Image (spheres, rainbow, N blue to C red):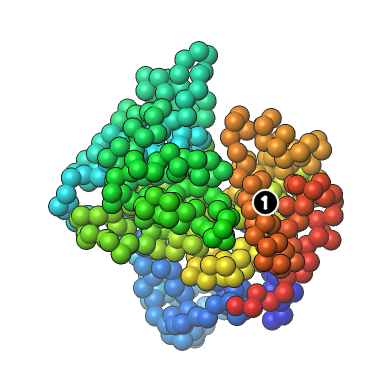
Amino acid sequence: MGFPALTSLMAQYIIFTYSHLTLLVSFHFLLISYLLKKMNVIKYSKPLLTYSRTSYSILHKSSTNLITARSKTTTTTTKSKPKTMASPNRLKNLSVNFPIKKSESTVSLHPLSRDPFKVTIIGSGNWGTTIAKVVAENTAIHTHVFHKEVQMWVFEEKIDGVNLTEIINTKHENVKYLPGIDLPENLVANPSLTDAVKDADILVFNVPHQFLARIVGQLQGHVKEGARGISCLKGFEVGVKGVQLLSSYITDELGVACGALSGANLAPEVAKEHFSETTVAYQLPKDFKGEGKDVDHKILKALFHRPYFHVNVIDDVAGISIAGALKNVVALGCGFVEGLGWGSNAGAAIQRVGLGEIIKFGQMFFPESRVETYYQESAGVADLITTCSGGRNVKVAKFMAKTGKSALEAEKELLNGQSAQGIITCKEVHEWLDKCELTQEFPLLEAVYQIVYNNAPMENIPDMIEALEDFGF
């Protein structure tokens, strides 16, 4: 099958999912992995159907046996039933041969041989407060693993003359950034960054990434030795070291082994406890103290997993970080064409090109990232589809298209002090690609940058997006 046909199939797939967001993640995995196989991006090993999520175990045999089993069943049923009808016996046989076993959502934790972990959330915006709610609910349940109280650093501001921290600690609601959502009483807002992180074993970073350098600077010398981190930030650090994951930047600056959290998570939906899932990535550091003594995948699962917020923990920090950063740039592109009134076909085309460029960027600059992360995990294609169907970046881009206002004007007018991360990420990516003389290899990412920062006409997007060459990896 040729590349144009394959990309057409991918476009049709995204059109369908763009308007049917309730499709099962397993369907995403099977279809996209098939297309990537055809493009020689991945190679299958038997069995043909494999879903390695920790929440499911697929117990079928190899692809060869799958075909054989189907053939035998068909032969049996055609004696008494037309081929166009499904035989109950045939379905029964298939369910026996290929059962899907759901494993328990709860985590069996090794007894701690240390004091419970103290957790601090750094950031209190829309997503920061939502994650703080999730974490505080879990620390209140698993008091043998975590200190019940969770500190949340809040950038102090006045709301009708009253400090926001006071409102959160008395009314248990972030009335500015997450109004209408009840927060756990064990979540404590703290206006002092250094006091909030005092003696913390786990730091969860959740601030707009343009403020990270300043916050890290304030934290130096105040972080507990041996503390671990999880970054919920989306973006890159571009500097003298080149393009760097934000989790790696935190590790380099603070000496904190840091993973990442990313997924198809619109904060208001998670806060309202509507079902969703996410991916946490964390690699055990060289100074890992051992199970029951240090943060590991089980501890992180217990910290973030809720009945309404399902968590899969992997070790591909680079993969989920790249997908989480670049999907915001793609979402701006979708917002542009949506604001122009071009419909779902155009949005699907942007997503199709965007997915290819995300994978290509990851394999080119972070070869340790795994391709399967982009289509198998919530942090990959599921997050791309969700982000491109709504959220801050789409809202800002649509407003730009309809009003002619700049990105920064739209952000200020629409987002109540919050950020559309795609605006700064597309600039960082452009600067890096320009330095590497590779802007032509990523036409969509470059097109979004030119529209946002150089007022390139949005109507020219089709001409600005050149046909992707074979990924070449």
Q: Quadrant of residue 189?
A: top left
Q: Nearer the viewer, residue 42 or 306?
A: 42
Which quarter of the rendering shows the C terminus?
Answer: bottom right
Residue 391 position (above or below residue 282) = above
Residue located at (47% from left, 54% from top):
249
Residue located at (32% from left, 27% from top):
185
- Identity of the amino acid at label 1? Lys
Residue 37 position (above or below residue 321) = below
**Tag count in the figure?**
1
Left or right position of 316 against 423: left
Left or right position of 80 against 152: right
Residue located at (73% from left, 52% from top):
449
Residue located at (60% from left, 38% from top):
419
Q: Is residue 120 visible?
A: yes
Residue of label 1: 427
Give x and y (percent) for residue 107.
27, 54
Q: Nearer the viewer, residue 285 or 14?
A: 285
Give x and y (percent) for residue 397.
72, 43
Give x and y (percent) for residue 190.
38, 28
Residue 148 position (above or below residue 72) = above
User: How packed is label 1: few (under 14 Cα within 10 Å), some, or many (20 or more)?
Assistant: many
Which quarter of the rendering shows the N terminus?
Answer: bottom right
Give x and y (percent) for residue 443.
74, 62
- Secondary structure under tag 1 reads helix
Left or right position of 338 against 194: right
Q: Is residue 311 visible?
A: no
